[in-house]
Amino acid sequence: MVRTRIAPSPTGYPHIGTIYQALFDYAFAKKYSGQFIIRIEDTDRNRFVEDAEGVIFKAFEWFGLTEDESARKGGDYGPYRQSERLDLYQKYALDLVDSGHAYYCFCTKERLEDMRKVMQSEGRIPMYDKHCRNLSKDEVSKKINDNITHVIRLKILEGRKIVVNDGIRGDIDFDSNGVDDQVLIKADGFPTYHLAVVIDDHLMKITHMLRGEEWISSSPKHVLLYEFFGWEQPLFFHTALLRNPDKSKLSKRHGHTSVKWYQEQGYLPEAILNYLGLMGWTNPDGKEIFSLGEFIKVFEMKDLRSVGPIFDLKKLDWMNGEYIRQMSDEKLYNRITNFIGEEYDKQLVKRTVPLIKERIKKLSDYIPLTEFLFKRPESYEVELSDKKDIFKKVAENLDRVGDWEADIIGESMLKTTQQLEMKNTEFFMLMRLVITGKKISPPLNESMEILGKGECLKRITSLT
């Protein structure tokens, strides 16, 4: 039975990279009729954000990546919050101490900081110097009885090769002499990621563990932990990091990493998932546009590439626009009204959908493009005060129009261009400006039909 998991930390709001990882976990589990689990890694209490967990779950709901087990849904392998599993981590950490694979460390922060500075000054990679590794049992007992602050560290075996088998990259060899004696239990009693992830993945029966390539260097510690516990490890898959077009890491310093940003910009969740699916993976059928269901059918974790994919917002804009154009008018109307809220006349919005469907790439484009339909322009992109005679003639001709329909409006204005002996392009640009305030807008004749005869004449005569 395939069991995958995503384990976000409630230290901030959901990152698009988390959704990127979750998509692969979700798709692989669903393809093989397995379970997709959301586990909350909330042991970093210094960076804990109170409402972040709820926002995380809402983000997964928005994308339709619904979990089978989680802190909110429950399941057979809970609790699903690490802060509720502290007794488990303590138990297994003490088992490692008893078996000689871990030890108590009583070094102060000041000593550790001085040690790091010396190593850095000598050009060495800062690592723990194993100062407490060989303390006698009596020394350890006395320090614990004296309530001296301590942590528990992993005892890395010296002089051996550690092999990490990666489903994307193959075997990766590490020299254990370059692996630090990792802290497993912090002074506050909370576990570090390294201990908790191994215990949780084992007890939750995770079969395929997918995470970013930044964790490759930590993998030998995890391989050793599985070995020391005598547990079978899940299959490891380390995905390439998402990168900006300049090849820099897509990090929280960039505004377009938060899921909230994509929601506010009016991107469609299905378009984002489609785009993320192409990050580091190629559809075997050569398709660029495909549904989540289609993705699930053809996706295999082993087909992920190890090269960092470029996350290009321009390409996402194009794809989002394609999704908008493939929607029915009714569905697009519902998406737009949900996005812009109750402020705008819904019947008017419905009439505009066919006009703007080919012209917007995301839902946030709607109001800038159609605002002139909801309120009269307050300014114009071109000076129009010297065009009074033209607008007077236009108003006279449009006032004679009986059936206020786009085709008839267009015929009337074409006659006006002939009477004024103006070029069509110049005339219709002026009319677009007086009606919309802008040089670029939805189709002019259809827009004027929606606005109505009275409103159009008011806008035109206001400039005569």
Image: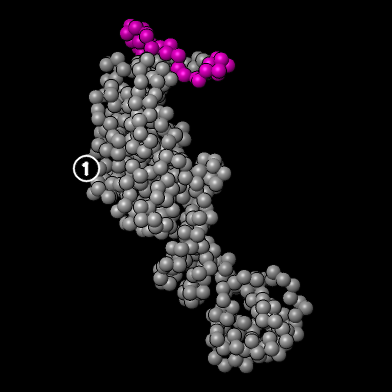
Instruction: Say few, some or many: other residues with alpha carbon within 10 Å of mark 1 (under 14 / 14 to 19 / 20 or more).
Output: few
129 is within the stretch colored magenta = yes
Residue at 55% x, 66% y is 367
| Quarter location, residue 387 | bottom right
449 on left or right of 427: left
**Is residue 16 within the magenta segment?**
no
Residue 226 location in percent, x, y? 29, 26
- Vertical comparison of 263 with 419: above or below: above
**Which is nearer the eye, 282 or 40?**
282
In the rendered structure, which amino acid carries the disc numbered 1? Met
**Which residue occupies the foreground of this view, 207 or 304?**
304
According to the image, label 1 marks what residue?
Answer: 1
* Residue 458 relative to residue 256: left or right: right
Magenta residues span: 117-146
Q: Position of residue 30 (x, y in %)?
A: 28, 50
**Which residue is rendered at x = 50% and y = 69% of the image?**
358
